[in-house]
């Protein structure tokens, strides 16, 4: 399979959920009827779960080559190539937006504390290990917090995959599945210990004390180990994808009855149901271990979609429409730039509403329309002139020596 059908659509959904969440946060007008108010609450409360979708999707795409090599009785994919690809994908765009956001913060908020420390931990992808640095540029580009946690998952993936390759003399899908269930159990135990032993004090803890207080409220429920549990739902999905790929007779038999389409629809319905029904649930509710984003139910629902949608006859093509494929291609740029653009546009176009919310619906539509347009423009420029050229250099550098050839993984 040269390309994973449907996964671009899932990526676009995750990306737009995060963007719309931040947009709706800046709307101070209540919807006129109960249904629209519910939709508004979904985008305000549950849409941030798009971050979890990103983690599950990344786990699927990046673990797929490991699963394939493992079940093909081949050696583990080269870590040098893996590292080069991840660095080329993340570092250029992230470093640029981090640095620009920090420079703007210096100009606009000269008294912001711990700036140098936040910048250093941002550059080294260690910001997510402490509430003081959790948001590298808190006021102007809050969403950058997730990058360090995702990079930590990049690190854990080959470590645990290395254990699987080393331990398994007789390779089988069942053996690998049991191994990863054991890893999941270990991760959940470690996460429980972190939440028990690493609780911060209650001094200035809460969003009323600003971004640092908010991070102190989030942690330790938000921690790098815990987010790897989300990532692992994607690892399981990739394993089942490879297993299905190696069983063409079973796959064709199931496809005749539209099993993959129905299963994918079931996963999407489950995902939407969670977002809708949990819109009044308190923070860290409806989850194991006080995990964010309704873990594991939401991550499992997306993992189910990712497992089967590449083999679907209809759903994958609907998800991968032209708009969603383009959005997926530039999604990293959309994610890292949209909040900064939103803050700057609001400061210029809606100065009477600083900092938020905008209490006039037409003004909000106008401002957010400008934000979305500029975000897509800047993300497109970032993709064509920064991200893709450097990815192409990385691909040429390791051409012929790697097995990471999925079209979609270039955008993960």
Image (cartoon, rainbow, N blue to C red):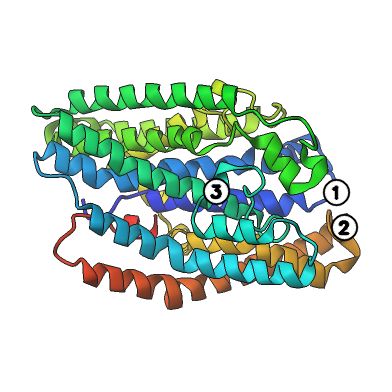
Q: Position of residue 93 (x, y in %)?
A: 49, 67
Determine whether the residue tagged by mark 2 lies in a helix, strand or loop: loop
Instruction: Say whether residue 234 is left or right of residue 26.
Output: left
Residue 174 placement, left or right of 214:
left
Q: Residue at x 50, y 32 (%)?
A: 226
Give x and y (percent) for residue 57.
41, 44
Res. 10 visible in picture: no
The residue under label 3 is 146
Q: Say which quarter of the image contains residue 185.
A: top left
- Cβ atoms at labels 1 and 2 below 8 Å apart: yes
Q: Which residue is mark 2?
A: 360
Of mark 3 and mark 1, the one earlier in the sequence is 1
Count neighbours of disc 2 (C-alpha within 10 A) and say few if under 14, some if 14 to 19, many if 20 or more. few
Label 1, secondary structure: give it.
loop
* Residue 304 appears in view: yes
Residue in the foreground of this view, choosing between 250 and 284: 284
Q: Residues within 10 Å of mark 3 (few under 14, many from 20)?
A: many
**In the displayed structure, would residue 14 be above or below residue 73?**
below
Name the residue nearer the viewer: 387 or 12: 387
Image x and y of residue 407, in percent: 29, 59
Instruction: Pick whichever of labels 1 and 2 is earlier in the sequence.
Output: 1
The Cα–Cα distance between marks 3 and 1, rounded to whole angstroms, is 29 Å
Q: CA distance from mark 1 to mark 2?
A: 7 Å
- Residue 10 x, y percent position in the rendering: 45, 47
Using the image, determine if residue 132 lies above or below residue 188. Answer: below
List the residue tagged with mark 1: 29
């Amino acid at each position: 399979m040269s390309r994973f059908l449907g996964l671009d659509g899932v990526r676009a959904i995750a990306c737009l959920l995060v963007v719309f969440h931040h947009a709706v946060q800046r709307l101070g007008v209540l919807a006129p009827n109960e249904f629209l108010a519910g939709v508004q609450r979904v985008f305000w409360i549950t849409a941030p779960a798009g971050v979890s979708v990103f983690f599950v999707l990344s786990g699927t795409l990046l673990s797929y080559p490991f699963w394939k090599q493992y079940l093909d009785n081949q050696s583990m994919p080269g870590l040098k190539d893996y590292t080069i690809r991840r660095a080329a994908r993340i570092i250029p765009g992230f470093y640029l937006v981090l640095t620009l956001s920090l420079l703007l913060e210096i100009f606009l908020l000269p008294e912001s504390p711990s700036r140098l420390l936040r910048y250093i931990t941002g550059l080294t992808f260690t910001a997510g290990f402490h509430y003081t640095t959790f948001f590298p540029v808190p006021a102007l580009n809050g969403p950058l917090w997730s990058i360090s946690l995702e990079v930590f998952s990049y690190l854990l993936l080959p470590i645990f995959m290395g254990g699987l390759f080393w331990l398994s003399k007789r390779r089988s899908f069942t053996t690998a599945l049991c191994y990863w269930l054991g890893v999941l159990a270990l991760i959940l135990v470690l996460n429980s210990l972190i939440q028990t032993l690493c609780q911060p004090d209650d001094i200035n803890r809460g969003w009323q004390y600003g971004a640092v207080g908010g991070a102190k409220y989030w942690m330790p429920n938000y921690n790098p180990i815990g987010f790897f549990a989300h990532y692992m739902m994607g690892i399981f999905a990739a394993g089942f994808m490879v297993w299905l790929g190696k069983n063409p007779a079973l796959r064709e038999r199931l496809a005749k009855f539209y099993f993959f389409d129905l299963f994918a629809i079931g996963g999407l319905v489950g995902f939407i149901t969670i977002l809708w029904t949990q819109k009044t649930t308190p923070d860290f509710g409806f989850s194991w271990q006080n995990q964010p984003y309704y873990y594991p139910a939401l991550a499992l629902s997306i993992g189910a979609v990712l497992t089967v949608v590449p083999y679907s006859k209809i759903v994958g093509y609907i998800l991968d429409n032209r708009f969603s494929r383009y959005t997926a291609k530039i999604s990293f740029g959309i994610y890292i730039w949209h909040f900064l653009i939103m803050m700057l546009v609001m400061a210029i176009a809606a100065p009477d509403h600083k900092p938020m919310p905008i209490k006039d619906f037409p003004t909000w539509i106008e401002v957010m329309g400008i934000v979305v347009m500029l975000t897509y423009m800047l993300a497109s420029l970032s993709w064509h002139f920064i991200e893709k050229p450097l990815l192409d250099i990385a691909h040429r550098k390791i051409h012929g020596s790697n097995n990471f050839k999925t079209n979609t993984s270039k955008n993960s």
